[in-house]
Image (cartoon, helix red, strand yellow):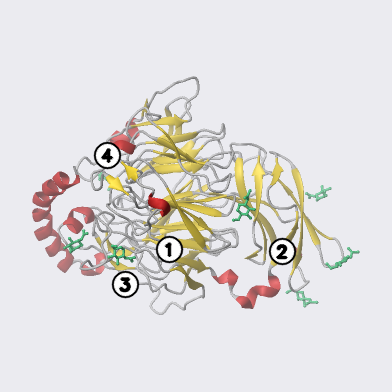
Amino acid sequence: MITNKWRILKVRATYFYVTMLLRTLLFAEFLFPVSPWPSQPIDGGGWHLLQENIGVLPMHMQLLHNDRVVIFDRTDFGASNLSFPDGKCRTDPNDVALKLDCTAHSLEYDIASNSFRPLMVQTDVWCSAGAAMSDGALVQTGGFNDGDRRVRIFKPYPNGSDWEEIPFALAVRRWYPTNQILPDGRQIVIGGRRQFSYEFVPKTNGATKAYSFPFLVETNDPMIENNLYPFVFLNVDGNLFVFANNRSILFDYARNKVLKIFPAIPGGDPRCYPSTGSAALLPLRNLQAATIEAEVLVCGGAPKGAFDKAVNRIFVGALNTCAKIKITDPKPEWVMETMPMGRVMGDMVLLPNGNVLIINGAGSGTAGWDNARDPVLNPVLYRPNDSPGSRFRLLNPSPIPRLYHSTAVLLRDGRVLVGGSNPNVYYNFTGVPFPTELRLEAFSPPYLDPEFENLRPKILSPSSQTTVSHAQQLAVRFTVTGNNVTLNAVEVTMVAPPFNTHSFSMSQRLLVIGGENVTDMGNATWDVHVSIPKSGTIAPSGYYLLFVVHREIPSNGIWIRLL
Ligand SMILES: *[C@@H]1O[C@H](CO)[C@@H](O)[C@H](O)[C@H]1NC(C)=O
Ligand SMILES: *[C@@H]1O[C@H](CO)[C@@H](O)[C@H](O)[C@H]1NC(C)=O
Ligand SMILES: *[C@@H]1O[C@H](CO)[C@@H](O)[C@H](O)[C@H]1NC(C)=O
Ligand SMILES: *[C@@H]1O[C@H](CO)[C@@H](O)[C@H](O)[C@H]1NC(C)=O
Ligand SMILES: *[C@@H]1O[C@H](CO)[C@@H](O)[C@H](O)[C@H]1NC(C)=O
Ligand SMILES: *[C@@H]1O[C@H](CO)[C@@H](O)[C@H](O)[C@H]1NC(C)=O
Ligand SMILES: *[C@@H]1O[C@H](CO)[C@@H](O)[C@H](O)[C@H]1NC(C)=O
């Protein structure tokens, strides 16, 4: 299927090749703008190699509330580098690579012990989606071939559990869809290759329906399909913000109705797969206010035409812009900002202190097999509260390129787990520009630097796994290593652990739930009184990480379950 598409693209791209070469020569400065940060200082952060070889490529990652990360790849790549013990194998007559496969394509990584165990996934999970449900189980949808209509469930407990699969649980085949957790506890599954529709999981009342979604037809460029893995966020009004290709809408999924068409992103370049940029819903604040504001930030991607050219071995510089829009504004406009460098396939990770980490990716090319060059090894930090023009910080580089099929998720201790990179059709360790990468790293953002240890809060209560309900008042008791709290610099945040794949963190959400109300309890402890968000529209039920942040330095998180 892909090979056919590429053959067509090749013919078209010969024309592009000549015209774009001329344009590149004529407008070199326009295409490769001079960085406004000629000598950007590096602002810290550190990398740690966790595992030399985890054996399975982390194409998809989800942190669960038992502090383990479920990782999976695709199943039809041939053998992975992690074998099952005891001669356990999978027989799959539909597998296009190995009918009898005694290697794992999924694993459970235990953060505390830095160890992992293989999991058995039966059908092809390639380029799929998912979300942690309100009970904490990972529910994962779709994929390729025999997996494209499956729903798979991974329950964190009991220890030693494995994937369960439900055949034909999706109404239609979905490959490259985006999922988002909803206020009623279901997840919505949107799009996928040649699927201009959405549906819900789990199905209620036995309904197996898919609902048509013309926006995905309108944003579909049939040759390039630049609207796969659309960026979807639950807005504070209960509707969905959906961004595909270069356009976005506010969508009422319950009534199948477009409520608002946002202005096109300035420049008109595509930001979704395969021109893969990324997007994040910025921290939601002032949740007690009558009107709550929500802002979306879209960063990086590849310019128009870059995919055609990448297929023909011309690697165009990635976009170096971020575009921000207040989606709750009556007259919303995009505001552009410039990153320290261009980046395609960057991951945007919301950190406990509300800053956005932009990590992984490449400086040229696009997503897709061997379509990118110039790995971007330095993460950057975006600080939403700083003044425009000075929001980005360049951080220390990893030695490891993380291109197509890389992942990054926030952990409870504030580190970011980073894995993957496999721009090759199989596991390929030699003779390719970017070998399949099985090393697992953790990135420690600057707030973990020892110099900030004196400021670091430690949560004394409630205990981890505490259950809370919407609109509940909660006292969070903490100490600070240096026994000194700057009272007006405390914040408590709640972070929903997202499902990360293909440079997008689905259902990622950070809520600032308090910080103004801090009481000195004596004996070097403080209580901060916070309000759990009032509804599932603002914070869908489920497990969240709760952090106390003091002068931008976060505590270790605790898990809370919002019922
Ligand atoms: C993975 O396994 C293959 C085949 O056994 C082997 O050639 C290769 O060196 C292994 N690579 C890594 C990184 O483990
Ligand atoms: C599950 O595993 C964790 C750590 O690996 C351990 O602390 C816990 O006691 C185990 N629980 C059960 C029920 O075995
Ligand atoms: C947005 O993308 C479409 C489809 O690729 C393209 O036709 C259109 O010109 C783009 N919009 C702008 C403003 O460039
Ligand atoms: C790895 O890539 C090389 C170079 O393209 C190719 O010759 C070889 O067949 C590939 N190996 C596998 C297992 O795909
Ligand atoms: C506490 O912190 C404040 C603000 O940083 C500082 O001015 C003050 O000197 C500190 N007090 C002690 C006792 O360390
Ligand atoms: C601060 O917390 C106390 C104790 O829960 C509560 O009585 C008070 O109303 C809170 N004040 C504000 C401004 O939230
Ligand atoms: C004060 O804190 C110390 C050390 O955490 C503890 O041993 C002591 O019981 C506390 N005293 C009171 C009055 O809470």
Q: Earlier in the sequence, mark 3 or mark 1?
A: 3
Q: Earlier in the sequence, mark 4 or mark 3?
A: 3
In whole angstroms, how far apart are the C-alphas of marks 4 and 2? 49 Å
Task: Say which residue label 1 marks.
Answer: 359
In whole angstroms, how far apart are the C-alphas of marks 4 and 1? 27 Å
Marks counted in the figure total 4
Q: In the picture, residue 478 is in which quadrant?
A: bottom right
- Asked if ligand 1 lies within 8 A of label 1, the reply is no
Whether label 2 touches label 1, CB < 8 Å? no
Of the two numbered discs 4 and 1 in the rendering, the one whose residue sits closer to the viewer: 1
Task: Say which element carries label 3.
Answer: loop
Image disc number at residue 458: 2
The residue at the point 59 percent across, 69 percent down is 447
Q: Amino acid at mark 4?
A: Asn
Q: Residues within 10 Å of mark 3 (few under 14, many from 20)?
A: few
- Give the x, y percent position of residue 398: 41, 72
Of the two numbered discs 2 and 1 in the rendering, the one whose residue sits closer to the viewer: 2
Q: In the picture, residue 36 is in which quadrant?
A: bottom left
Whether label 3 touches label 1, CB < 8 Å? no
Whether label 4 touches label 1, CB < 8 Å? no
Front residue of 267/450: it is 450
Task: Say which residue label 4 marks.
Answer: 220
Of the two numbered discs 3 and 1 in the rendering, the one whose residue sits closer to the viewer: 1
In whole angstroms, how far apart are the C-alphas of marks 3 and 2? 44 Å
Q: Amino acid at mark 1?
A: Ile
Task: Say which residue label 3 marks.
Answer: 34
- Give the x, y percent position of residue 175: 32, 40
Give the side of residue 1 with respect to residue 240, left or right: left
Residue 331 seen by the camera: no
